[in-house]
Amino acid sequence: MAQHDYNIDDQNGFDFLVDLNNALSAIATNNAGSSEPNTTFAHMLWFDTNNDLMKVRNEANSTWVIVAKKDGSGWTPYRQGTALGTASVQPDDRYVHRTNNLSDLGSATTARANLGVRVIDAPGTAPLFACRAWVSFNGTGTVAIIGSGNVSSITDNGVGDYTVNFATYMTDDDYCVVGTCDETRSIVASILMCEESNVDNTTILIKNDGAQPEDANRASVAIFR
Amino acid sequence: MLNKRIIYQNDTGGVAIIIPADCGLTIEQIADKDVPTGKPYKIVDAADIPTDRQWRAEWTVDEADLTDGVGA
């Protein structure tokens, strides 16, 4: 700890050496002392050992501005005279909806889970294409939809003849229609075929192995694009 | 809504029956959207539709009864 007025007096050689070393010591210790230096300069540093505060002189050399506080073996930074705290003591209530920390971003699985992102875990580099609409329905008795996605309705046009109406339309009619159906009423073998494709709907036919329309107990259709 | 059906007359004089999906639209919105443009329709209970489909191709409907709206 040392302070100096940063004015080397006209003096003999030994006193000059002592004076110079005192000035260098003051620089090396950031003018540390329990009271402020007698002579101050703009932007001068002063470590206030009485309060463990690092201060800097303002540009007008009119006052001291606290920049940090020595806190044990660490430092607490200040901004505009107010302590900013440390990362270790910041309240976590702003992030209560997260159960993990930012450090978990290093784990793709944990990060996705924290963000609520669900992804398809598909191996390889081949591109993925999504199902844009699907429906499963029973075609006998009271025709009814069992489950669906992006389908507003199905139209029962007749025996084995159904139109799937999309809730949100496709961009074009180049999509792929995939379907299955279980055995028809009277014939074990059955086939589901696409009759017509439009941006707003697609019509499928279910036929038996005699190429005659048949209702299926259950039919499923998926649209890929 | 899922126990409702929308019926209209198809181009060959038969009956087309729309079965609504649980998609967030009302039965009226589905009718406006999925009934072909200009076709009058009627919203009926699903229980009113015959379950025996043996003669499905023979089902008919009087167009005068289709009074609930017209496909948009």
Image (cartoon, helix red, strand yellow):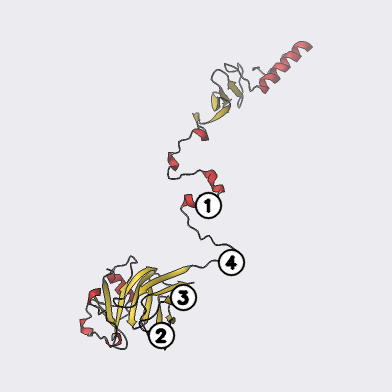
Q: Earlier in the sequence, mark 4 or mark 1?
A: 1
**Distance in Å between CA atoms under marks 1 and 2:** 47 Å
Q: What kind of element bears circle 3?
A: strand
Per the image, the residue denoted by label 3 is: A178
Quick check: B12 above or below A220? below
Q: Earlier in the sequence, mark 3 or mark 2?
A: 3
Chain to which mark 1 belongs:
A
Q: Earlier in the sequence, mark 3 or mark 1?
A: 1
Q: Earlier in the sequence, mark 4 or mark 2?
A: 4
Per the image, the residue denoted by label 1 is: A109
**Distance in Å between CA atoms under marks 3 and 1:** 32 Å
Disc 3 residue crowd, few under 14, some 14–19, many 20+, Cα 10 Å: some
**Distance in Å between CA atoms under marks 4 and 1:** 21 Å
Chain to which mark 4 belongs:
A
Whether label 3 touches label 1, CB < 8 Å: no
Q: What kind of element bears circle 4?
A: loop
**Distance in Å between CA atoms under marks 4 and 3:** 20 Å
Asked if marks 4 and 1 fall on the same chain, the answer is: yes
Amino acid bearing label 1: Thr
Amino acid bearing label 4: Ala
Q: Nearer the viewer, mark 3 or mark 2?
A: 2
